[in-house]
Image (tube, rainbow, N blue to C red):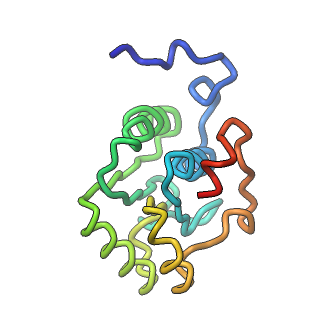
Amino acid sequence: MARREKDVKSESIFSRQLTRRSVLKAGLVGAAGFGVAPILEACSTSPSSSGSTNKIVIGTFQDNAMVPFRDVFVKRFQSETGIKVQYNETNYDAWYQNSKNDGLHKTGAYDIYVMDDNWVPEFAAGKVIQSLDKLGFKVNPDILANGLNQ
């Protein structure tokens, strides 16, 4: 299948300059649009879980909806910024346990958590989730409102 990147307007995410912060935002908003709830720890200008701003660690379960993010956005971000992305993908049950343990014990193994929506109430109750609104993230108007309100 031909890459759709060439078909996208010049003002799109595919042609804009990427920064560490913009990829974190795009990953979070994009994951929400795919029906998962992204959780961000240590965003903005703070160091990543690796202790530097030269690496971002993303944890997720295997989900075909994340393929465009992994195969297009992550690779482009790395080539444009020189910041390495460690994309950890595992099976659903293992990722649930890994993310829960990391979040509750605040080990900082991940900068971005990609989670299934049905985990959100439990992680919110455990104070693992941060409000994206309170972190200053704005909803991308291109994403359907219903997708964000799941």
Above or below residue 143? Residue 118 is: below
All told, the count of numbered labels is 0
Kindly identify the residue that appears in the image at 29 percent across and 52 percent down.
Answer: 62
Q: Quadrant of residue 19?
A: top right
In-front residue for pair 81/115: 115
* Quarter of the picture holding the C terminus: bottom right
Q: Quadrant of residue 78?
A: top left
In-front residue for pair 97/102: 97
Above or below residue 96? Residue 72 is: above
Kindly identify the residue that appears in the image at 56 percent across and 52 percent down.
Answer: 32
* Quarter of the picture holding the N terminus: top left
Is 23 situated left or right of 103 in this image? right
Residue 40, position as x, y percentages in the image: 55, 64
Kindly identify the residue that appears in the image at 43 percent across and 62 percent down.
Answer: 116
Is 56 situated left or right of 92 in this image? right
Residue 123, position as x, y percentages in the image: 50, 78
Residue 79, position as x, y percentages in the image: 45, 33
Above or below residue 5? Residue 57 is: below
Is 45 situated left or right of 81 in this image? right
In-front residue for pair 47/65: 65
Kindly identify the residue that appears in the image at 52 percent across and 59 percent down.
Answer: 38
Q: Quadrant of residue 136?
A: bottom right
